[in-house]
Amino acid sequence: MITFEEAKAIYEKQYPNYAISSALDVGDEFVISSRDKESGEELDISPIAINKESGSMRIFFPPMNMAKLRNAVPVDIE
C-alpha cells in the first residue's frame, strides 16, 4: 500500500505544471485536486485518483463517485 507522499510523487511526475490544492483519502484511493503552478488558479478539471495498492491513476469524476466521497477524509498536503 502506498502512502500519500508516494501518491504525491506519482502525481507530480505525471503533472509537473500542476500544484496540489487539496487531497482526500476515500479508502482505496487518494483523490487529488490541483491548481496551475504558475498562475495559482484552480483548474476546471476532474480530480485524479491514485490507487493505494497499485499506484495507478484515473480521472475521478465526482458525480460518479458520490458513495466514496461521503466517507472521504481530508489529507494534510503540507
Image (cartoon, rainbow, N blue to C red):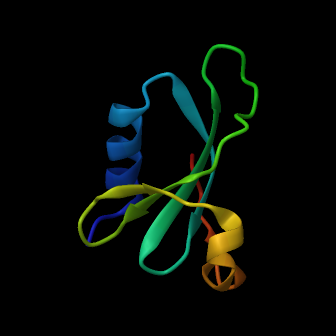
**Left or right of residue 57, residue 1 in this image:** left
Residue depicted at x 68% and y 65%: 62
- Which of the pair 28/64 is nearer the observer? 64
**Left or right of residue 39, residue 37 in this image:** left
Asked if residue 63 is positioned above or below residue 44 in the image, the reply reads below
At which x and y percent is residue 53? 26, 72
Asked if residue 26 is positioned above or below residue 32 in the image, the reply reads below
Asked if residue 56 is positioned above or below residue 42 in the image, the reply reads below
Residue depicted at x 71% and y 83%: 70
**Left or right of residue 54, residue 78 in this image:** right
- Residue farthest top in this picture: 38
Snapshot quadrant of residue 52:
bottom left
At which x and y percent is residue 28? 42, 78
Asked if residue 40 is positioned above or below residue 51 in the image, the reply reads above
Q: Quadrant for the N terminus, please.
A: bottom left
Residue depicted at x 36% and y 67%: 51
At which x and y percent is residue 33? 62, 48
Residue depicted at x 34% and y 42%: 9
